[in-house]
Image (cartoon, grey):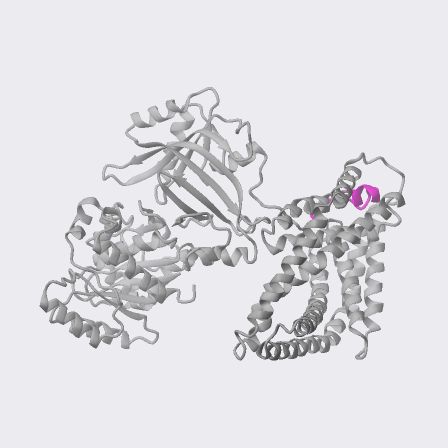
Amino acid sequence: MQALATYSVKGGVGKTTTAVNLAFEAGRTGVRVLVWDLDPQGAATFLLRARPKLRGGSRKLVGRKGALEPHIRSTDLDGVHVVPADLSLRHLDLHLQRAQHPSRALRDLLAPVHDRYDLVMLDCPPSISLASESVIATVDGLLVPVVPAPLASRTLAQVARLLRDQSDPPSLLPILSMVERRRKVHRELVEELTAAWPQLLPTSVPSAAVVERMGIDRSPVGAIAPRSEVALAYRTLWTDVAHTLWPAG
Amino acid sequence: MSPTYARADVESDRVVTALSGEGWVLEGPHRHERTVLDTFDGRLHRAGLRLEHRAGRGRSALVLQADDGGPPAVLVVESVPRWPHELPSGPFRTRIATVTDDRALLPVLSVRSTLRNLTRLDARAVPLVDVEVHDGLSVDGQEDGPPVPWLAEIVARPGHDGAAEQAAALLEGMDLRCLGADVMTVLAGTVGASLHGHDTTPRVELEASEEALVGYRRVLRNLAGTIEATIPGVLTDVDAEFLHDLRVAVRRTRSVLAEGKAVLPPAVRAPFRDLFRRLGHTTGPARDLDVYLLGWGRYTAPVSDATPAALDRVRAELEVRRQEAHEALTTILRSPHTREGLDEWRRWLEGPDTPTGGPLLGPVVTERIAHAQRTVLTDGRAIGPDSPAEHLHELRKEAKRLRYLLECFASLFPSKAHRAFVAQLKELQDNLGEHQDAEVHLAYLRELAQDLHHRANVDTDTLLAMGRLTHHIDRRRRQERRAFVERFAGYDTKGNAKSLRRLLEAGAG
């Protein structure tokens, strides 16, 4: 099983949108995906039409062997399961502090379902916390959506610094998100970011109104408007990501 | 497991109406086709995997389901693949390819139906459970269709076990009968199809105290079943393993016939030994070339960096020869002589088991195994550094004969001790097999080089590449030859002799 996380210290950059759309694209190419919604807001849970309920809350989840499995729910997407989020996740850091090995806690929870999924996608809240350290210690790649904005490079640098502190850090996989090619400032910033960050995945995701429809239809864009520019971008982006995960496959 | 329900004297509409009345969401009807795919020997099934091609509502997809609680993996495809490498790279392909190896994917059971899907949603429109109602069922290759007019299958969703239980209670409340398994398993059972694949390992229940002739016939019937099941795959050249399985079944048959002098009527044994000897020889050239081509990458890897293109010509030539060898083989397999011989063999095997007062199975088999072991040890001990390669080849054949006897009559012996002894024997066989393969490949290369040179049909680069390859294979042959001394010594031990003695004592009854 490979593990990815959509992560950023900044909110509103498209983490959940990326997680749900990439899970959809992965699922339709025969990959078994477990989306684990770690954000107490539960946006991925909502989009995947799961009930926002962690029975017993996050307290009962952390540090208990086999505790994840009862929370796994099916979704309407081919090959995709979800561990839903609820508000109890706002205390996740507290519970991790009490765990014997906080940084290993999420990985240990995933161990029993390791063979059932090809990919686990962790959708993280925007923060730098114990939970994000545990996420970083768990995943093989960190998908970091960046919106072309003056502070984008600084945000990426913060994440890169976070990774440098790890003994076996995941790959940093920045994604250009919500790009408006018509805007000169976006084009210039994309150029700057591409030059400064060679790790940037080659496919950028355009800004599009159809993304907003995800919240209304509770479906990924690939299901709502499969031929739209943004759906095609996620399809290509998934191909980029899949090549990094299974290069010889 | 998705349980399936049915009731012959009730219309499926009653189920659909009842569930719709409870607020379940109805989708369909639409035509639906499901085909279970697996290798001839059921490798996916044995690995706990179910691969299905599903077509309906304009979508054609492969669905790979493991019995581990994970989601079914779904891959949209334009056509049904014969080989995993026809699929896009990624985990889906890898999961299949690592299990199927060199075997092709074949349709095992194909079912058509008119499908109506009912989904129960909760108050937030979260789907909890599905019931699939299949009407107008037909199974490919079955003219009459299955003896059930319709089936309803509960498809549970993870995390909603309660909803699945409630669905089962609803169906049972309509007096529907639970048939246990999923639709495909139920239909396979009703039409007598197997989702397990053909087991080419002889598994025959035997008693040491039964008459030897009866036990021998049962073993030979099992082997005849494998021969008959593999021939169509050889004729259509589905994958190379069909020929391998056929060849092994023929060899096992020959070994049992050879060791059946005191058991089988001479009027039966002599002509059929002749039939299977000819069949065995017929399969040799094609199988040798299959082995060469299947292992081509491994054989040529050490020299391919220097001469990648030059060896393409050699491979192409080998492929032509393989094609010719297969054509010669299929001509013989299709010949009236072979077909009539095998029909006659089947007739004798299906004849009544009339008691003849002959010897008992346990003592006969153990005596023959002891004899085969003595031959292996005598021949092996006689091999020295200067012994010709043919002596090793003869020893290999004797070791095979011993192995086949142990395998064909396996149920007479305690399984753990049996497995341990066969594992020791296999170590020796692996060495002899590698040595023989290298000998055969060298002979092919030399003969091929002469032929190409004679036809003035080869460039210098190719000849040089063949020289390098010959050198490499010869080095491998010499390595195996040197390793033989140690491998045989590891087999010819007091401990091994004692293990076999105990095994035979237990098997004699």
- Give the camera-side residue of A218 and B127: A218
Q: Give the main secondary structure of the magenta stretch.
A: loop
* Residue drawn where x is 81% and y is 57% of the image: B369
Q: Is residue A126 magenta?
A: no
- Give the camera-side residue of B273 and B235: B235
The residue furthest top is B9
> In the rendered view, does B388 fall on the left or right side of A131?
right
> In the rendered view, does B219 fall on the left or right side of A86?
right
> In the rendered view, does B490 fall on the left or right side of B64?
right
Q: Position of residue A9 (x, y in %)?
A: 18, 67
Q: Is residue B361 visible?
A: yes
Q: In the picture, residue A19 is in which quadrant? A: bottom left
- Give the camera-side residue of A201 and A66: A201
The total of numbered circles placed on residues is 0
Q: Position of residue B465 (x, y in %)?
A: 59, 78
Please report the bounds of the magenta region as a residue range. B202-217
- Give the camera-side residue of B432 and A132: B432
The residue furthest front is B456
Q: Position of residue B423 (x, y in %)?
A: 69, 62
Q: Is residue B392 above or below residue B290?
A: below
* Residue drawn where x is 77% and y is 62% of the image: B397
Q: Is residue B366 above or below residue B148?
A: below
Q: Is residue B95 visible?
A: no
Q: Position of residue B372 (x, y in %)?
A: 82, 60
Q: Is residue B211 magenta?
A: yes
